[in-house]
Amino acid sequence: MPARTRGGALTAKLHGAVVRWFAAEARDLPWRDPDCSPWGVLVSEIMLQQTPVVRVLPVWREWMERWPTPADLAAESPGEAVRAWGRLGYPRRALRLHAAATVIATEHGGELPDSEDGLLALPGVGGYTAAAVAAFAFGRRASVVDTNIRRVHARLVSGAALPAPTLTAAERRLAEALLPDDDATSVRWNAGVMELGALVCTARSPKCAACPVADDCAWRAAGQPPPSYVPKGQAWHGTDRQVRGAVLAVLRAAPRPVPRIFLEGPAPADSAPALTGSVSTGPELARLHGLAPAPEQLERCIVGLLADGLAVELASGLALPH
DNA sequence: CAAACGTGGAT
DNA sequence: TATCCAAGTTT
């Protein structure tokens, strides 16, 4: 198994091919700018979790302009972070990024930890993000394993169409075995393999003709066999996630705190005049999203939003934290 | 470890 | 129109 031998001839060939390809074809993304701060890299990594680059770009620029340092964000309310998150999705990421900024500002003197372990201790930072920030912000040799890298490894080395349904120990070992020994090359390799997965070795229609390592690809050599399992998609229509999303949209758009009684359903006729101008979520869900969740489901979602800190119950109602 | 967690563009 | 899928983390 030459490919599993660190420092072997084949891995050296792969390193050169991918690093060269990356130097020529990499997208010019702002968080890859040498002048981008570690904080900028962290913000990008959190925003990019399960969210495409094109949608992250404008929001990342707004955040960097508004909150150039962790202390700047920490000085704001969590609710502002959630509002500024816009429609990137998974808004709990905004809350955790705010929490991370607070930890960085209060416990690390405003500077990001530069080790994987230190980064891993931050809210919202898991194994992938800790390795990515250590590598891309601090030039460390870290084994970065994201969905793109897993897919490239699965095809190039394992000969499978897709990586395992969940990250396995074997995948971690393989990624570590393939990682170049020196810091500088390891960073380019991580970035290059990730970019290769994003632009060429894509999930649906891989562009093998444009691949710098096609000649060494085990999956291609095997005739591109189909996946050995069927990825199960995420249900959406009628789910709590859909209702949560709709309620969140109403909260984000609301000009003021939303009384909980309105969140849960149509406004009682006799109380409407006293709250003119406030938002009534039940009708808003129907009007804006065509949703009419059962009262139990709406209640469950509101309770969940409160528990997650995405909404805060005030004396008079429910609103994004302020 | 499986399930939950948003959103919108692409196919 | 329906399904897929995108730089994951947490419980």
Image (cartoon, coloured by chain):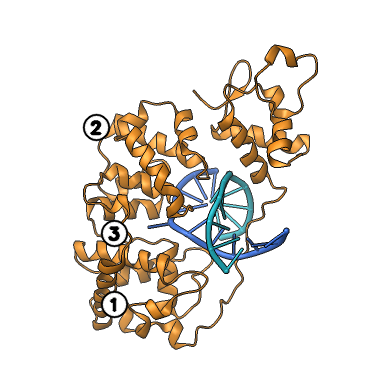
Chain colours: A orange, B cyan, C blue
The residue to which callout 2 is attached is A109
Which amino acid type is shown beneath numbered disc 2?
Answer: Gly
Q: Residue furthest right?
A: A269
Q: Residues within 10 Å of mark 2 (few under 14, many from 20)?
A: few
Q: What secondary structure is marked by label 2?
A: loop
Q: Report the front residue among A100 and A292.
A: A292
Q: Which marked residue is nearer to the observer: mark 1 or mark 2?
A: 1
Residue A172: where, in percent of width, then height? 39, 66
Q: Is residue A284 visible?
A: yes
Can you say whether B2 is above or below A243 in the image? below
Q: Which residue is mark 3?
A: A142
Q: Provide residue A295's location: percent of width, then percent of height.
A: 77, 34
Per the rendering, the mark at residue A14 is: 1
Residue A111 % position (x, y): 25, 37
- Spatial CA span between label 3 and label 1: 18 Å
The amino acid pointed to by label 3 is: Ala
Marks 2 and 3 sit apart, C-alpha to C-alpha, by: 24 Å
